[in-house]
Image (spheres, rainbow, N blue to C red):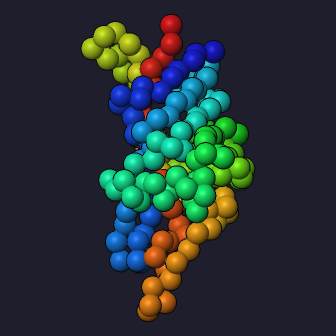
Amino acid sequence: MAKWTIDTNHSEVGFKVKHLVVSSVSGKFATFSGTVESAKDDFSDAKISFSADAASIQTGSEQRDGHLKSPDFFDAAQFPTLSFESTSLSPVSGSDYKLKGNLTMHGVTKPVELDVEFGGIHKDLYGQTVAGFEINGKLKRSEFGLTWSAVTEAGGLVVSEDVKLHFNIELIKQA
């Protein structure tokens, strides 16, 4: 069984949320970690464990980041960690996979399904074996207790219910 860890210097954990229905706000979590255990080179038997520090959220606005860390959204003081445990990683076609697992956020655990593109395995300049993945998905924030909402004078939502997830993950095979 090979063990892999996320190379946080070459990975990013990001999201996008519609703001006022007309534009998107992007953000990321700056502090995260994860491991993958797999006996197969195609990762089809992978067991994936991931966590992110809710207080490490960054959207380019200190005021917005403070609001997102507050009890209105992530409540980072009470729920400091977002976590994911896989239940399956299944090949779909070529380098495309479906990743299923349980996401815990804001004290709520729900099953999620994500699209994965496996970029392959290579040796880096330092002789380490690395693997790359691009992961995309969507979730409804209210299903995880992130229910803060405001409405504009015209009746539109200030923050969308749907959150798009986008992760670029590089793994390093452990000796």
**What residue is shown at x 58% (from left), y 54% (from top)?**
74
Q: Is residue 147 left or right of residue 154?
A: right
| Residue 2 at least partly seen | yes
Nearer-the-camera pick, 83 or 116: 83
| Residue 131 at least partly seen | no
Q: Is residue 93 left or right of residue 11?
A: right
Q: Which quarter of the rendering shows the N terminus? A: top right
Q: Is residue 118 above or below residue 24?
A: above
User: Horizontal and vertical percent for residue 171?
Assistant: 45, 26
Q: Quadrant of residue 40?
A: top right
User: Horizontal and vertical percent for residue 126?
Assistant: 31, 10
Q: Is residue 159 above or below residue 122?
A: below
Residue that sits furthest to the bottom in the current view: 154
User: Horizontal and vertical percent for residue 141?
Assistant: 59, 63
Nearer-the-camera pick, 39 or 139: 139
Count of picture labels: 0
User: Horizontal and vertical percent for residue 149?
Assistant: 56, 74
Q: Is residue 139 above or below residue 86?
A: below
**What residue is shown at x 57% (from left), y 26% (from top)?**
35
Q: Is residue 46 above or below residue 126?
A: below
Residue that sits furthest to the left in the current view: 125
**What residue is shown at x 54% (from left), y 39% (from top)?**
52
**What residue is shown at x 62% (from left), y 32% (from top)?**
49
Nearer-the-camera pick, 12 or 116: 12
Q: Quadrant of residue 34?
A: top right
